[in-house]
Amino acid sequence: MSSHEYTVPVPGVEAAEVPEPGAVTIVVPTFNESANVGQLLHRITESVPSRLPLEVVFVDDSTDDTPEVIRRAARDCPFPVTVLHRAEPVGGLGGAVVEGLKAATSEWVVVMDGDCQHPPSLVPELVATGERSGAALVVASRYLKGGSRAGLAGNYRVAVSRAATWLTKSLFPRRLRGISDPMSGFFAVRRGAITAEVLQPLGYKILLELAVRSRPRQVAEVPFVFQDRFAGESKSTAAEGLRFLRHLAGLRAASPAARVIGFGLIGASGFVPNLGALWALTALGTHYVPAEIIANQFGVAWNFLLIEHLLFRDRRAHRRWWDRLGRFALLANADLVLRIPLIALLVGRFGMSAVTATALALVVTFVLRFVGTEALVYLPRRGGNRTTARRAV
Ligand SMILES: Nc1nc2c(ncn2[C@@H]2O[C@H](COP(=O)(O)OP(=O)(O)OP(=O)(O)O)[C@@H](O)[C@H]2O)c(=O)[nH]1
Ligand SMILES: [Mg+2]
């Protein structure tokens, strides 16, 4: 993908209607927001055009009549309104925002929700702040003085939002410096600052994606009050929360150093099923050598599941799951072959308990296992092709 794609005009917008440079494209993802979009366009009309030339691009995945309602309401708008209805909602909300960013033609793009929780009156201020400070990204923050989360329905949502923000900021302290509200869905970005590789539709929180994968050198923030939904139902679900956690893990695992740490943490968590099974088996009277072998399989299965889903999610496609599992299990058990004599030594010569000796040996073989896993299980094959996979060695 190259940057010239961004200059492709929005389908359905006449060239003469495209705003001049310095103007703004408001991108609004919508999913069944028919009760809100008219009100949103009304509020935009009231507060933006007199201060800033604009166009509005809705990226719609609705199953109701939202596109129709938008088209009707657009007749009263003094600016161009486009609806990109997607027959296939690829990437959900994140994918929709990416489509909108690609379709935008103005110098500035503002992303906002379609349910009136984000006040359009702030749009000119977001852009003006960017122009004034030279920032390429301006975030509307609920956590700055003057901002608030008034519209988050209930203590539960507030707690979840706060925990997610804290977790996100702790995972990316450097990249998110200066961004108090990385979960905000309301922000302005210079179109030139959006690079193709950051536009990964799977990212559900696009701001986080932008800030982490290609953080512009300068960012600014403006406080805002997150209002109540005007009408309709929330689309945020527990499944979306899980998707967010996977997204966080994927972003974090993109750096090799973080992958080593993640691998270590997952390996350490594997102590629990491993030692638990070992304890149970030895308590049942099994000799510690066969008990080690069986208990190790519990740790292997646990580690494999976590590593697959959290660390190498994006690097699984070039081998089938059983191929990966086979290789992973082979590595882990080869490591056990190394470990058994070491454990025998520690138990026999130094009088350690089986549990302590196992813990020590697991740490020693960790590095070997990490290198082997990267190289033999998840390293994309050179010149390899997904569909013509060679047989596993
Ligand atoms: N195109 C598209 N838009 C979506 C999708 N899911 C949600 N949206 C839109 O994204 C915006 C934010 O979704 P909301 O359900 O309001 O999420 P929220 O603001 O975290 O939740 P509430 O506080 O309860 O409103 C809204 O404009 C939705 O219509 C989707 O799959 N596709
Ligand atoms: Mg909302």
Image: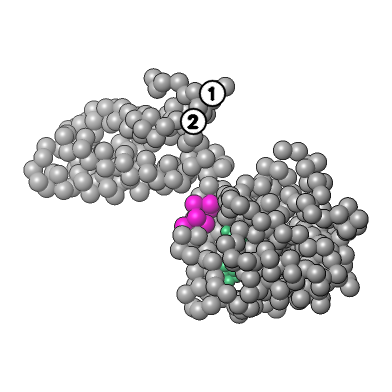
Dominant SS in magenta = helix
Q: Crowdedness of circle 1 by 10 Å Cα count: few (<14), some, many (20+)? A: few
Label 2 is placed on what type of residue? Answer: His
What secondary structure is marked by label 1?
loop
Q: Position of residue 114 (x, y in %)?
A: 66, 68
Which residue is found at the position 13% from the left and 44% from the top? 282
Residue 318's tag is: 2
Q: Quadrant of ligand 2?
A: bottom right
Q: Residue furthest left?
A: 285
Q: Is residue 177 visible from the viewing direction of this image? A: no
User: Where is mark 1, residue-wise?
Assistant: 384
- Ligand 1 contact, mark 2 (Cβ < 8 Å): no
Looking at the rendering, the stretch of residues picked out in magenta corresponds to 242-248
* Mark 2–mark 1 CB contact (< 8 Å): yes
Query: Which image quadrant is residue 335 in?
Result: top left
Residue 212, above or below 374: below
Q: Is residue 309 magenta?
A: no
- The structure residue drawn at horizontal position 54% and vertical position 70%, both measured from the top left corner, is 234
Q: Is residue 200 left or right of residue 388?
A: right
Q: Nearer the viewer, residue 378 or 294?
A: 378
Of the numbered discs 2 and 1, the one sitting upstream in the chain is 2
Callout 1, which amino acid? Gly
Question: Residue at 31% of width from left, 41% of height from top?
Answer: 301
Image coordinates of residue 356 in percent, x first then y, are 25, 43
